Structures are given as structure tokens and as C-alpha cells.
Amino acid sequence: MPVIEYKCPNCGSSMVFDGDTGKLTCPSCGRTDNIEEIPDPLKQQVFIEDEVKEYHCTSCGAVLVTEPETSATTCSFCGSAVVLSDRLSGELAPAMVIPFSITKEEAIQAFKKWCRNGLLTPSDFMTADRIKGITGMYVPFWLYDLHNRVEVHGHGTKVSTYTRGDYEYTETQHFDIYRKIRLNYVKVPIDASEKMNDEVMDKLEPFPYQQLKDFKTPYLAGYIAEKYSYNDEQLYPRAKDKIQSFIDSYISSAVSGYTTVNFTHKQIDTTLKQADYVLLPVWMVHYDYNKMEHTFAMNGQTGKVVGKPPISKAKVAAWFAGISGVSLLSLKLISWTMGGGFL
Amino acid sequence: MRRRYALWMVLFLLTVCWMMPTGIVNADGDKQLIFDDANLLSSEERNELNAMANKYGAERETDFMILTVDRVENVSVKQWTEDFYDEYAPGYDKPHGNTAILTIVMDSNDVHLEGYYKAEKYLDPGRLDKIRSKITPALSRGDYKQAFEKYIKTAHRYMGFEPDRNPDNILFNIWFQLGTAAAIGAVAIGIMAYRSGGRVTVNSRTYADDSTSGILDQQDRYIRTTVTKRKIERNTGSGSGGGSGGGVTRGGHSHSSSSGKF
């Protein structure tokens, strides 16, 4: 049975990962186990390659209701934290994981604080008292190491002007520019989950990579985890696309001191050095407001919140009137001090 | 009988002289400020402009006068206008008082502006030049009414600014001020709304491996230098030629002036 559950050796309850202590913790008796020291059952089990159609909870025997991507969840009948190990092994085995460091309570507090800071958020939304659900989820990401060889040819000009007598002279110096650049990017994250909005996931970055740990299944206990929907080859174009703007800005910083620069030839050779499959921690907050469900994502390490809060028309109008009014008044004052009259 | 006639004549002239300070008053109680000897305007246009000149002039305590003639004999348009001021003694506050005069001479296509007293201070040669260049195109087209309206409105507006300021500074324009304020508000709201959903906080250096990245080879080869030259436009005012400055009338009244052709 490819279902792993961590039973507390003391009391038999289902143990979960605690982001505060970084240890496997028993919510009943308070026993903590250091994850580094537990032998990972994943490495001992051998699976038959057959697609398993049904998973049963090891505690109560009920059928685990899961989506095809889910690799860790809790039993909807007895609440035991279970890990579906066949979805985390073989090709689907993550290399590393960043565990949660923000607990559920801290996440709720951080979310409420974030809501209060919204300048255009309706005031009854700001109280954040209608959180419908908050889910800790390990989102599958690919971390790409990309090495780039860049060669650019271009045409640059330096322009200076001076006056002699009745004439203004514009002197333009023309240059041929050539640059050969080596640009290496490491651990560029691309989310591999079909469900997650790419734009939202991009905004959650950066994840603190010093927290990356070798993957062990106990980190997932008590959280939802998903397996990747796209493999590293499928997402390679997105990774290249993502570093494109980084490369362009590096090239322009490498060509300085010119008035204008035109690149006539730009060659970028990207080679994929490595792509690691990792699980990164994200809190998903579901919030009901005006019969609409709003979803927010929070970085499970840094607490950064991403998502579109509703916008209050009244607040927009008030801010617009306020800012425009103050601007108009300042312009009037400037014109008045310059002798232009107040009205 | 003849003596009696002469006495009436003297009395009439005295009355005219006595009336002079306030100028000739027409039916609406307005001063006559438009003297259209060249007949460039219809009588309705003349009345309309006269009323307008009175209304705007009152706000600036200055008479905005318009003189049109077919030709001036033996004197320059400047001298002719100065002589008019000395003889007619216009002025909003007193005879020989605050006055701005626009003189048009049809034969020689002269357009000439003078400012006396308050108008000398507030309509300095530079501002008179600006007014002249604003009205010259309409005069050249023969659109006299529009040119005269523009003269009255612009002179009125310019006199609202302290001397030595650029009255056409865009900062003083109410539409510019309103537009800029609204734009600042809209941009601020846009930024606030855009940032409400969280923003990207990684930049091009976040994932760069600085230890192995760098410029391997570079060349900046000089090819050639090109030089273009452009004649600097000296500000000569519009119309053909022109001049500005000031002067003193034979009666001893100092004024600012600007003249040109249309």
C-alpha cells in the first residue's frame, strides 16, 4: 500500500510537520522527532509500476479522496496526515524541499496584517474575518541552472553639441561595438503545477534558497502536496523566456557611455546545466467577499502575499480627489510664488 | 451775430475739453476706446469691441485703445501714436493715465503697440512683442475683429501677472494645472491598484551567478565622426522686421512700445 503515515510511537496519533520547530510533531502528546534522523520510508519501499487507482487511509481504512496530482493530503474522514508515496518516487521524486517556516496561525495573522495595509481595499474586507479556508501546499517547481553565451554586435554613437558664432554644431562619433559575455543563472524557479497561476507564482519569489533541504517525506506530513504536471523539458521555454529580460538588462549595462546603441546582431546560446525538481511552501488563502471567492497565495517562508484584493470605488474616488486636490493646490502655490496670481 | 456764434463755439469747445478726462461717453455709459478711422469694422463689431475693451479695461484699471488709420503723414507710427496720447489724453484713472494703445496703419501695414503708466509697467516691450506676434497672423488674414479681441484679451491676461514674469509660462495655465493634477491623481491610483496584488520583487541579479558570469571580450572600434550644423534662429519677432523698446512723448509721458508689420 503506497500510503505513508507517521504514527506517534508514544500515543499512536498521526504526526505532522511543524514549521515553527522544523520537526515532526505529535499534536496529541507533544512528541517531536528530528526529521534528519528518521529513515525515510520512501527509500525502503519498492513499488510495482502499476497505476494505483485507489488509496486507503492506513488509520481508518477509508478511501482517500484525492486529485490526480495530489501527493500528500489529510484523510477526509479521520484527519490523519498521509503521504502518497508512489507519487513521490521514481521520476516524481523531488530533489529538495523548502519546508514551511510560517505556521497556520502566523499565516492567518500575516494575511490579516496585509489586508489592513491595502490602500484601496474596502474597509469591511480589511477586517479579514471571512477567511473561508487556509491550506498549506507544497507547490512543485523546477529550478533551472542555465548557462548562457552571449555575443552582440552593435552600433553606438556619442553625440556632443557646441556653438560657434551663429551656428550650432552637432558632432556624432560612430563606434562599432562588440561584446562577448558569459552569463550563468542558477536556480531559476518555474512552477510546474497546472493549477497554479504562473503570474501569481512569479510574484511569490524570491524563495530563500538557504532553506533548501534534501527531500524527506515527513516534511509533507499535515500539508497538501502536488506532483508536477509538466516536466523540465516542457517548461524549458518558459525558463528561457524568464531570463531573457535579465540577459537584455545585463547586455545594456555592459554597453555604457554611449548616447544611442543599436544592436545589429544578438546571439544568445543557452544550455541547460541542470533542472531540479523541488517542492516550495505556499499558503493558499480562500476568502469570501460579496459572494465572490478571492484566492491569495502567501510565500510559506517569507510571508509575502500575492493576489488581487477587491477594490473599493469609494476609496479610489477619495484617493483620487485627495491626491489631485493636493497637486492642484501645490501647482497653484508654485505659480503664485512665481508671480502668476493664485487664480 | 457773428460774435454770438463764436461765443457758442468757445462754450462748446470748453464743454468738450471738460468732458475729455472721462472721454466721450456713449449710450451704454462706456468710454469710446475704438477709433476705427480706416473702417475695418462694422458698427456692430465696433460696439461689441468697445464694450469688451471697457469691461476688460476696468478689471486692470487700464484703457485698452484701438486706433486704425489709412495713413499717417510725415511722421512715424510711433510718433503719431505718441502725439495722439499727448493730444487726446486718454487714461483709465486720469487724463494721461493708464493706457494701452494698438495702432494699425493700413497703407504701410504697420502694427504698433504702446503702454503708458500701469500698462508701461505691466506691458513691457517683451510682453508687447508677444501680443504683437499673437495678433499679426489674424491681421495679415484681414480678420481684424479677431485680432482686436485677441489684443484686448491677451493684454488683460498679461496684466494679471507681476512684471518680469513670463506670462506664457505653462505653469500659470489653469488647464495645465488641472490636467497635471488629474494626471498625478490617476497615475497614483494606477500604481496603487497595480501594486495591490503584489509585485515582482526579483530583478536581473537575483538568480545571476556573479562568480562565473562576466564580460569575456569587448571591442569599441571608432569608425568616423559626422558633424551637422544648424543656423541659430535669432528672435526677430513675427511679421516682417519690427522693433521694441520705449520712449517719451513730446508731452513728457514715458511708455513702452513694440512695432512691426502685418
Image: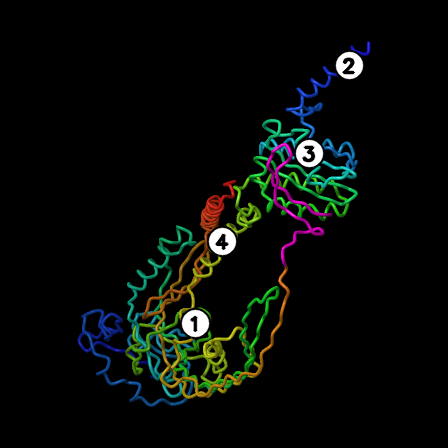
Q: Write down the residue under mark 3.
A: B83
Q: Which residue is mark 2?
A: B6
- Magenta span covers which residues? B234-262
Could you give the CA–CA distance between mark 2 and mark 4, rounded to whole angstroms? 75 Å
Q: Nearer the viewer, residue B216 or A227?
A: B216
**Chain of the residue on which disc 1 is drawn:** A
Q: Nearer the viewer, mark 2 or mark 4?
A: 2
* Foreground tag (1 vs 3): 3
The residue located at (30%, 70%) in the rendering is A78
- Note whether B234 is above or below A335 in the view shown: below
Q: Which residue is under mark 4?
A: B184
10 Å crowding of disc 1: few (<14), some (14-19), many (20+): some
State how far apart marks 1 and 2 are (Cα). 103 Å
Residue A84 visible within the image: yes
Q: Secondary structure at mark 3?
A: helix
Mark 2 residue type: Ala
Which three-letter amino acid code belongs to the residue tagged 3? Asp
Identify the mark at residue B162; answer none if there is no mark: none
Up-down: is A310 above or below B216?
above
Horizontal and vertical percent for residue B221?
52, 85
Separation of marks 4 and 3 at Cα, in angstroms:
53 Å
Q: For marks 1 and 4, give the CA distance.
A: 29 Å
